[in-house]
Image (cartoon, grey):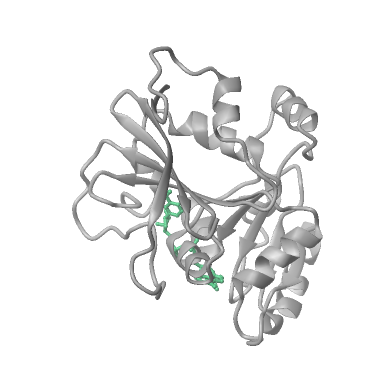
């Protein structure tokens, strides 16, 4: 993994240098995606078909630096989400940074209709959070009662919707302010429209996918293109790992 921007470096970055580069501030909402060179966000419906060199290393690090992994229900279903993988070494590094040993997964669902038998609930060392609407919360609590998940209503003025401000406030109330959002495109769109994205990490896979794959943002109506500031660029084989700051930051 070589640093290309802002300070081109000859040598490979080690884990400590990467952790310093990707330091995650309190209160920062960081969004992380992988996309192909032609902008596809999935191959045959899953991001795993995008082969972006180095992204697994950085994706693992981003989770290691975050208080919570925030994700939309569409992604949980499509990608078969499970709890964050851990190891004694990773847990020790998190504790040394003052974080909980393992970051919980917080899933945002409007319908609140999640399978209690899914890996999100059955294959995890920490209980997930389910963020849903005021309308759906009671039903979700009943359906997920045996899983240990915490179901939280995060509607704003509309009891039938989730609102990004309420989502982030619920996480902050639990001390989870370093938020790593792993998508998907609809949730990213909602956060963007609400002006609640501080940073975008984008891994550019050296592939052309074609077809009608979606982009990293869908559904958002924002007032004209939003400008991004380039924070860092890493190169790994033919892949690029870009990090941008938004004007919201
Ligand atoms: N390349 C990558 O890095 C990457 C990352 C993530 C996902 N993906 C891909 O993206 C696809 C899934 O896309 P998606 O857009 O369906 O995923 P998504 O954004 O994860 O999920 C959308 C769902 O989130 C819930 N939601 C709750 N509040 C919302 C709000 N305010 N706005 C929008 N959605 C809200 C709804 O769940 P309910 O249906 O439960 O009501 C909605 O159907 C998959 O193919 C996946 O592989 C790729």
Residue in the foreground of this view, choosing between 21 and 54: 21
Residue in the foreground of this view, choosing between 158 and 223: 223
| Residue 116: quarter of image | bottom right
Q: Is residue 190 above or below residue 178?
A: below
Q: Is residue 60 above or below residue 32?
A: above
Q: Position of residue 241 (x, y in %)?
A: 40, 36
Look at 36% across and 55% down and name the residue there: 45
Looking at the rendered structure, the number of numbered marks drawn on it comes to: 0
| Residue 15: quarter of image | top right
Q: Is residue 163 above or below residue 29?
A: below
User: Is 27 situated left or right of 126 in this image?
Assistant: left
Q: Position of residue 108 (x, y in %)?
A: 61, 65
Look at 40% across and 75% down and name the residue there: 221
Q: Position of residue 158 (x, y in %)?
A: 63, 87
- Image quadrant holding the N terminus, namely top left
Residue in the foreground of this view, choosing between 13 and 46: 13
Q: Position of residue 167 (x, y in %)?
A: 66, 67
Look at 52% across and 51% down and name the residue there: 182
Look at 71% across and 49% down and name the residue there: 104
- Image quadrant holding the C terminus, namely bottom right
């Amino acid at each position: 993994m070589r640093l290309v921007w802002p300070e081109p470096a000859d040598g490979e970055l080690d884990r400590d240098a990467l952790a310093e580069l990707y330091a995650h501030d309190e209160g920062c909402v960081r969004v992380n995606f992988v996309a192909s060179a032609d902008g596809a966000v999935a191959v045959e419906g899953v991001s795993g078909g995008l082969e972006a060199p180095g992204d697994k290393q950085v994706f693992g690090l981003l989770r290691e630096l975050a208080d919570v992994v925030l994700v939309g229900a569409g992604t949980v279903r499509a990608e078969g989400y499970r709890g964050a993988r851990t190891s004694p070494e990773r847990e020790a590094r998190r504790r040394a940074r003052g974080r909980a040993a393992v970051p919980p997964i917080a899933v945002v669902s409007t319908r609140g209709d999640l399978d209690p038998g899914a890996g999100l609930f059955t294959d995890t060392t920490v209980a997930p959070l389910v963020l849903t609407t005021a309308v759906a919360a009671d039903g979700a609590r009943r359906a997920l009662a045996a899983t240990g998940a915490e179901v939280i209503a995060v509607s704003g003025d509309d009891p039938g919707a989730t609102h990004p401000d309420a989502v982030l406030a619920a996480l902050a109330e639990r001390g989870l302010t370093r938020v790593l959002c792993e998508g998907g495109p609809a949730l990213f769109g909602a956060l963007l429209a609400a002006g609640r994205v501080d940073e975008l990490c984008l891994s550019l896979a050296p592939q052309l996918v074609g077809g009608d794959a979606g982009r990293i943002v869908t559904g958002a109506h924002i007032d004209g293109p939003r400008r991004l500031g380039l924070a860092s660029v890493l190169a790994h084989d033919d892949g690029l790992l870009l990090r941008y700051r938004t004007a919201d930051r």
